[in-house]
Image (spheres, rainbow, N blue to C red):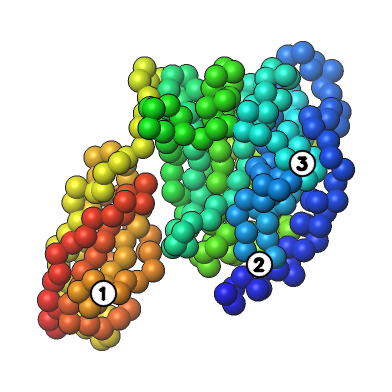
Amino acid sequence: MKYKRKIITGLTAALLFAVAVPFCTLAAPAEKNPQAAQDIVVVIDPGHGGSNIGGQIPGVDEKNATLVTALAMKEELEKYEGITVYLTRYGDQELSLAERPRLAKAVNADFFFSIHYNKAVPNRLYGAEVWIPSLGENYAKGYACGDLILNELCDTYGLYRRGIKTKLNDKGTDYYGVIKNATALGIPSMIIEHCHIDNEVDVPFFNSPEKLVLLGRLDATGVAKYFGLKSEVLGVDYSSVPKTVVAAPTSAVSQDLTPPETADILTASKADGKIIATLQGSDSQSSILYYDYSLDGGLTWSILHKWDSAGVANTVTIPADGDSLTVRIYNQYDLASQSRTVVLTK
């Protein structure tokens, strides 16, 4: 709980600012481009609002943090030519999951972005992820744009990359309401989950008003690159930025529902109070994301560690001593497979 107390003071000013802004929905942009009829139109949705608080830790309500980030994203995008930007809410207003995309439809939005911060039970997860529609051109557009946004959040800023994901309900359609409703209205959409507010690994990335603003600016840069925008104010031209091209699926792309096929310890030895191990993990449906380890046959487990390898094998150093080693290897959807237990020798 100590790390949570540290962020309370730093975020107070930003969160008070967020809740003090008067209620307003889809107010006109600050200044319309003279060629507004041809502009790209983007709607940014600060997640939650009103009695729908979202994730909470002491001193931080998600509904306020998302508004600060969304306002910063809007302000940054408006520095580019050829884009008009709206927010679904500018104050502490509660909107349904159907109302938010309908507001985007009312202004003929080219893309709908829902801004969020993550929280997990138990609070072991960390990193940034985006959720996109599961089908057709909206999947392809979401994937291309999501990849560019994660490049900014992860490659530029340093958040751990949890990936681009889909999620289906038990009817085989999109699980998340804003994505499902936006898709029904013909609007490409995504949910941006910036980081986990309840995990110490992610705290340094959001624990001040300036960092909440920076996250919005990074989102905006990814969007600007996706649409190939230019900005005289910023002195940038993204018209030639390459995008990841994926085929538009004709059937819904489901989340990975099975754990990794492979989880093994190829080699392991101990020396000087450390364990050096080569781990093997593979999953045909999604990437490997984390591993954790146990030195007591699976009774207790370490925190989640990053899987710092593009391949199936990963050599790791464990700063501990023990007589045995067991690992669990996790895929992109946080499903794990457990290895055999290896007896350690010097």
The residue indicated by pointer 1 is: 299
- Quarter of the image containing the C terminus? bottom left
Q: Position of residue 340 (x, y in %)?
A: 14, 64
Q: Secondary structure at mark 1?
A: loop
Q: Quadrant of residue 42?
A: top right
Q: Position of residue 337 (x, y in %)?
A: 23, 55
Q: Residue at x 37, y 64 (%)?
A: 305
Answer whether labels 1 and 2 touch (C-beta < 8 Å). no
The residue indicated by pointer 3 is: 93
The residue indicated by pointer 2 is: 58
Answer whether labels 3 and 1 touch (C-beta < 8 Å). no
Mark 2, residues whose alpha carbon is within 10 Å: few (<14), some, or many (≥20)?
A: few
Indicate whether 314 appears above or below 91: below
Label 3 – label 1 distance at C-alpha = 46 Å
Sequence-wise, the earlier of marks 2 and 3 is 2
Q: Secondary structure at mark 2?
A: loop
